[in-house]
Structures are given as structure tokens and as C-alpha cells.
Image: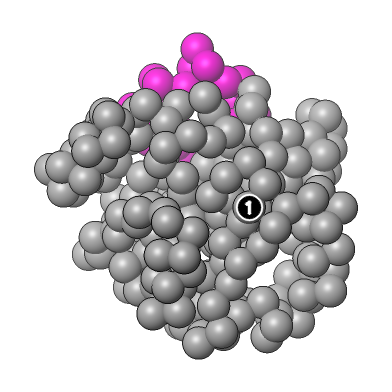
């Protein structure tokens, strides 16, 4: 699952890796700069089931059924005013999901309650703020999330905020810059060479033995996560 605004260079990377892509539909009811973001409109439960924005259920169901994945319509509607835009923006590790209380889509809560333990955090954009590398390994620029992950036994790396393009906003978030496409490969939406904290991020990826790919035709940019459909962390 990728933003429909992905660059031509990124499409070429997916072709090289022989990975199919499903492009998002724009969510007209939320703020335009993030209306293309996957992590604002869908959430994987266990990679057999995805909760998707109810107004786009038919589109995602048609795309996902090709891969044997069930699309479940969300309960909540979305609008542009926080926190009614963050129903899907949930950070998940193997045994926990981190989100702001009463902001999570009710269908997602129902699906996750027997699979994961809810951890209350102040950050409603917990997925945007978290780059998930492994079942229990994450990167964040949010100090509140950093402390919460650490307290719950998650291996967490801190990286400074800023230096990430997100048109319409002062900066983007590290979690929205890409996503894992296999157990040891990550793809980014934009040119990592243009990222202010490239050295720090590459050091983390090397330490975790993760191969990384990125296009050269766009700045290092937040497009709302790349979300794997077949196989992943929550199997």
C-alpha cells in the first residue's frame, strides 16, 4: 500500500524488487496534504484482514481480494479536525498498539482487542511518528513515544525531528517516510541523500542489518507510510 503521489523513481524501485503496489484513494474529508497517506485511511490487522476507510471499502476490497486479504469497513468517519482524522494512525508492535485514547477507529479496536494490548499515549499520530523496523524495534522523533516504547520493552531508537518534506506543513514525520517490504528490506518515498539525519538513520539500519532503497527524483518526503499487504510483522 503506497501513496498515489509516489514518484516515478519509486515505482521503478518496486518494479525492480518485483513488488506489486496498491495506490491509495484520496480521502477528501481530511487535510489535503495528508489525504493520500496510507496510514490515514487503512490499518492491517493480521495481513489476512485490513480495516479500510468505509467510504473506500469497494475500491480496497477489489484490490485486496486478489491477494486473499479481507477488507473490513471502518466504523469511524474521518474529517480534517484533529483528533477525528487519526482513527487509523496507530503504531503497532508485535504485542502492543500505541494510540491516543478514544481516537482509534472502533472497528480496529474490536479487531485488535484480543490480539494486542492497548497502550495509551498522548500522540494521536503515533504511526506517523514511528518508523517500525521489526516486531519490537522502532525509530521515533517523539520523546513521549520514545519513553513509552522503552518502558514497554520495545527496542527504540531516537532520531531528531525535522528535515523531512511534507508540503503544507513545517516538517514531515519519520514514520511516514517509508516502510518495510520484507523482513530485512525497507523502501523510502524520497531521496535519503537529501535527509538531514541520513547518517544517523543509516547507522540504525546497518545495526539492524536492514537493506534500504530510495528514489533519487524527489526530496526525502513523508507520504504516510508504506504498508505491506502480503506477509509482515503481525502474522
36 w.r.t. 67: above or below = below
Q: Residue at x 25, y 64 (%)?
A: 26
Which residue of the protein is positioned furthest toward the left in this rendering?
Answer: 58
64 relative to 134 in the view: left or right: left
Q: Residue at x 46, y 45 (%)?
A: 228
160 relative to 112 in the view: left or right: right
Q: Circle 1: is it few (<14), some (14-19), or many (20+) Cα within 10 Å?
A: some
Depth order, front residue of 125/42: 42
Q: Residue at x 36, y 45 (%)?
A: 42
What is the count of numbered marks? 1
Residue 162: percent from the left, percent from the top? Answer: 70, 76
Colour scheme shown: one colour
Residue 62: percent from the left, percent from the top? Answer: 15, 42
In which quarter of the view is residue 234 placed? top right
Query: Which residues, given as a range, are shown in magenta?
Result: 97-120
Which residue of the protein is positioned furthest toward the top in this rendering?
Answer: 114
44 w.r.t. 173: above or below = above
Q: Which residue is tagged 1?
A: 185
Residue 192: percent from the left, percent from the top? Answer: 67, 77
In which quarter of the view is residue 182 placed? top right
Disc 1 is placed on an element classified as strand
Depth order, front residue of 19/80: 19
Q: Is residue 61 magenta?
A: no
Depth order, front residue of 31/46: 46
Residue 165: percent from the left, percent from the top? Answer: 56, 80
Q: Residue at x 64, y 27 (%)?
A: 94
Q: Is residue 111 magenta?
A: yes
200 relative to 75 in the view: left or right: right
Depth order, front residue of 45/18: 18
Amino acid at each position: 500500500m503506497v501513496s498515489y503521489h509516489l514518484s516515478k523513481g519509486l515505482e521503478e524501485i518496486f518494479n525492480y524488487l518485483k513488488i506489486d503496489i496498491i495506490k491509495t484513494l484520496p480521502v477528501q474529508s481530511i487535510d489535503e496534504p495528508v489525504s493520500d497517506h496510507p496510514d490515514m485511511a487503512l490499518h492491517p490487522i493480521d495481513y489476512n484482514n485490513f480495516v479500510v476507510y468505509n467510504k473506500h471499502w469497494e475500491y480496497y476490497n477489489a484490490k485486496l481480494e486478489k491477494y486473499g486479504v479481507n477488507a473490513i469497513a471502518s466504523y469511524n468517519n474521518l474529517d480534517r479536525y484533529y483528533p477525528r482524522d487519526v482513527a487509523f494512525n496507530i503504531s503497532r508492535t508485535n504485542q502492543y498498539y500505541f494510540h491516543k485514547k478514544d481516537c482509534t477507529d472502533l472497528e480496529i479496536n474490536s479487531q485488535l482487542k484480543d490480539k494486542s494490548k492497548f497502550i495509551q499515549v498522548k500522540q494521536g499520530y503515533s504511526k506517523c511518528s514511528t518508523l517500525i523496523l521489526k516486531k519490537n524495534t522502532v525509530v521515533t522523533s517523539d520523546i513521549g513515544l520514545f519513553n513509552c516504547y522503552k518502558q514497554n520493552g520495545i527496542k527504540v531508537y531516537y532520531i531528531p525531528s525535522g528535515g523531512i518534506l511534507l508540503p503544507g506543513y513545517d516538517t514531515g514525520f519519520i514514520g511516514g517516510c517509508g516502510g518495510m517490504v520484507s523482513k530485512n528490506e525497507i523502501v523510502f518515498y524520497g531521496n535519503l541523500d537529501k535527509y538531514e539525519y541520513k547518517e544517523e538513520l543509516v547507522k540504525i539500519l546497518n545495526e539492524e542489518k536492514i537493506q534500504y532503497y530510495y528514489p533519487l527524483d524527489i526530496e526525502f518526503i513523508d507520504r504516510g507510510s508504506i504498508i505491506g499487504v502480503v506477509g509482515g510483522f503481525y502474522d
